[in-house]
Amino acid sequence: MPHRTSAAPAAPIPLWPNAVPGEKGGIGEEKDTSGPKSGTVQGKSVIRLGNVSKPTLTVYRPAKDKDTGASVIICPGGGYNILAYDLEGSEICDWLNSIGVTGVLLKYRVPKRPGLEKHTAALQDAQRAVGLVRTRATEWGLDPKRIGILGFSAGGHLAAAACNNFDKRSYEPVDAADQVSCRPDFAVLIYPAYLTVKEQGDKVSPELPITPNTPPTFLAMTQDDGVRVESALFYYLALKTAKVPSEIHLYPTGGHGYGLRPSQHAVTTWPKRAEEWMQVRGLLTPVK
């Protein structure tokens, strides 16, 4: 775990001011669904948060002397069933703070809602999150032109969906936060899932309509990932075809679901590679 270089996070902020779009209740109590037989990652347990019906943002600020003004919205993974809330959430915020970036942890709705696409409710939450951070950027001392999105596994798919669906909100606008752009300025996708359709020769999934306006993207994945490395590869090739500046790192081993907990596998050095990518793109240079 990175050394803590930030204050404790602020209290969670409700994502929606009033009713959450399409929510009818009956999901059950939000809780950690991990049990005695739940696996660990690098010897540590994982919070598997389930039954999320009240989405929130939790802002983790870096130390003032390190603050670059950049921010990243984090989408934990969990197959659109649960959220790996610490492994792919709060621990990522700590790392971002260590490089001077504000981490904004998105607790989006899971599990997928009956009768809807797996990502429908989550994409509403992600679009809303980008707009909300951009609207409050001045208040929070953030650069509204350096708001990124980072996702793992299903959260990687959600981040990619937010990067390719920003011209129109997927819900009825409710306030000023829905009047500004919900396009992320850059994306980091770590072992992303659902990016391609295997049965169609790994064609990019239809809900990810890549264009030259898709934000610059960093990807990392392993050859032995059960999600299939082709998911990241073919998505990267589609980005290249659209002339979207992108970088991909592929590693032979490491599987899936490691977050940034260090292991003997080289893939767990991805945070250093992502930091270098952000540095080169000018995302870590404080605005004078």
Image: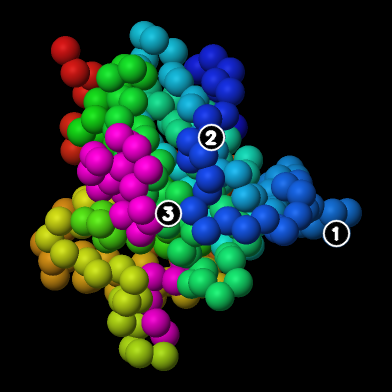
Q: Residue at x 36, y 19 (%)?
A: 140
Amino acid type indicated by mark 3: Gln
- In this rendering, the label closer to the viewer, 1 or 3: 3
- Pointer 2: what residue? 14
- In this rendering, the label closer to the viewer, 2 or 1: 2
**Please, is residue 16 above or below residue 28 in the view?**
above
Amino acid type indicated by mark 1: Lys
Amino acid type indicated by mark 2: Pro
In the image, 146 versus 192, the foreground residue is: 146
Q: Which residues are magenta?
A: 169-198
Where residue 216 appears, x then y in whole percent?
22, 51
**Please, is residue 115 above or below residue 147 in the view?**
below
Marks counted in the figure total 3
Q: Earlier in the sequence, mark 2 or mark 1?
A: 2
Answer with left or right where residue 61 lies relative to residue 26. left
In the image, 112 versus 152, the foreground residue is: 112
Where residue 165 appears, x then y in whole percent?
28, 60
What is the quadrant of the C terminus in the image? top left
- Pointer 1: what residue? 37
How does the figure colour the protein chain or chains?
rainbow
In the image, 41 versus 109, the foreground residue is: 109
Q: Secondary structure at mark 1?
A: loop
Answer few, some or many: residues within 10 Å of disc 3's Cα (few below 14, many 20 plus, some between 14 and 19). Answer: some
Cα separation between marks 1 and 3: 33 Å
- Pointer 3: what residue? 124
Answer with left or right where residue 74 lies relative to residue 187. right
Cα separation between marks 3 and 2: 14 Å
